Image (cartoon, grey):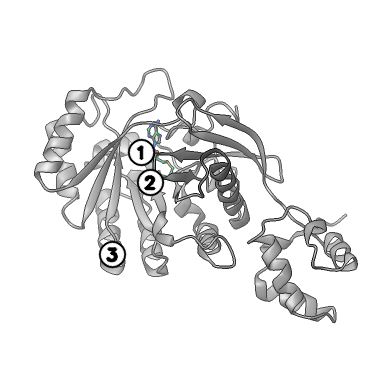
Amino acid sequence: MALKKDIRSLSKEELRSFFTSIGQQAYRGNQVYEWLWKKSVHSFDDMTNLTKEQRAMLADKYVINHIRVDQMQRSSDGTVKNAVRLHDGLIVESVLIPTDTRSTACVSSQVGCSLDCKFCATARLKRMRNLNPDEIYDQVVALDKESRHFYGRPLSNIVFMGMGEPLMNYKNVVQAVNLITSDDGLGMSPKRITISTSGVPKMIRQLADEGLKVKLAVSLHSAIDDIRTEIMPFNAKMDLGQLRSSLEYWYSKTKSRITYEYVVWEGINDKGSDIEALIEFCRFAPAKVNLIEYNPIDDGLYVQADDQVIKAYVKALESNGITVTVRRSRGKDIDAACGQLANKSTA
Ligand code: SAH
């Protein structure tokens, strides 16, 4: 039997044409589109303003490949992690990170990852496939529901910092952002969305041209090529020079400040020369540094540098006029923190 097509791969226009092609009115396409996105229904039977015949006809021809939250874990600090089952049985994870004033959704863009960052759990799973736009959208909807349920407020922010490299699934991530921000979807402001990349220069340029108005975060971790290549081997092919020029382009086009994510490890990037290189890298475009706490994923190969070194980073960055925040990890007890996704629930 031929596989039925996922109805959410159709645009609103395509849905309208589908109805006219079978001799029915185009506005039925608008109704279906609204059920699929704004109302996020899982079944054709829920589309109550269509006739029974229309619902049956759609179910005969199409499927709605909705995600399923298989397991939800809640951390002692309030962080929520969802193990999300996709229609083909693969699993990704997404995380809700509440603070006093915000609810941030951290979503996955790929099953596994094709990059090879030595310190990241997701990198150990090979990339199985890209997520479709609806699979990214559904993660946001699920976390929004949980935020309303547990914290009495909708999501305030979305970060593409879950599993995968969003810029290696460029088209689907852009489409997901368009759906999330559209009035036909969730109507969220793009300014509240951050795409985090390990630094793919060609795609950063494309994103700059896209005009999405999202924020950009770059997982830098070192501003010295040899060191960065050691911890993020793909840097041998996409080095800091290329990264820098793509970011100059990003800033010239968007005028949007860049965030650098940075972990400080003992014996890797804990020297004065590392700090100087980072400060230098922050000069060519307005930048902010997030010093992220390391979440160990292995047998002690990488160890977070001690507080003195972190303080030295903060002091040097601040005295050079660069905004820096030190981010404490959230959700560690349920393996929901940065770099831990895929540790347990997909093992
Ligand atoms: N691929 C994207 C998004 C996923 S990773 C990217 O690289 O930006 C989200 C963030 O977690 C990145 O900044 C990444 O460098 C960081 N990270 C990965 N493993 C980590 C770990 N074990 N501890 C702390 N941060 C980690």
Q: Is residue 249 visible?
A: yes
Circle 2 sits on which residue? 198
Which mark identifies residue 59?
Answer: none
Residue 110, percent from left and from top: 54, 46
Q: Residue at x 74, y 52 (%)?
A: 42
Disc 1 crowd, CA 10 A, few/some/many (<14, 14-19, 20+) = many
C-alpha separation, residue under disc 2 versus residue under disc 1: 9 Å
Cβ of mark 1 under 8 Å from ligand 1: the answer is no
Displayed quadrant of residue 235: top left
In the picture, the disc for residue 249 is 3
- Position of 90 with respect to 102 (left or right) is right
Around disc 3, counting alpha carbons within 10 Å, would you say few (fewer than 14), some (14 to 19), or many (20 or more)? some
User: Which image quarter is the C terminus in?
Assistant: top right
Q: Secondary structure at mark 2?
A: loop
- Mark 2 Cβ inside 8 Å of ligand 1: yes
Give the residue furthest to the front. 152
Please name whichever residue, 77 or 229, is drawn nearer the observer in this view of the structure: 77
Q: State which quadrant residue 316 falls in.
A: top left
The mark that comes first in sequence, 1 or 3, is: 1
- Residue at 39 percent across and 44 percent down: it is 101
Question: Three-letter amino acid code at disc 3?
Answer: Tyr
Of callouts 2 and 1, the N-terminal one? 2
Residue at 39% in and 64% down: 213
Q: Looking at the picture, how far across and down is residue 203, in whole percent?
A: 40, 59
- Mark before the other along the chain sequence, 2 or 3: 2
Q: Which mark is residue 232?
A: 1
User: Disc 2, disc 3: CB below 8 Å?
Assistant: no
Quadrant for ligand 1 reads: top left
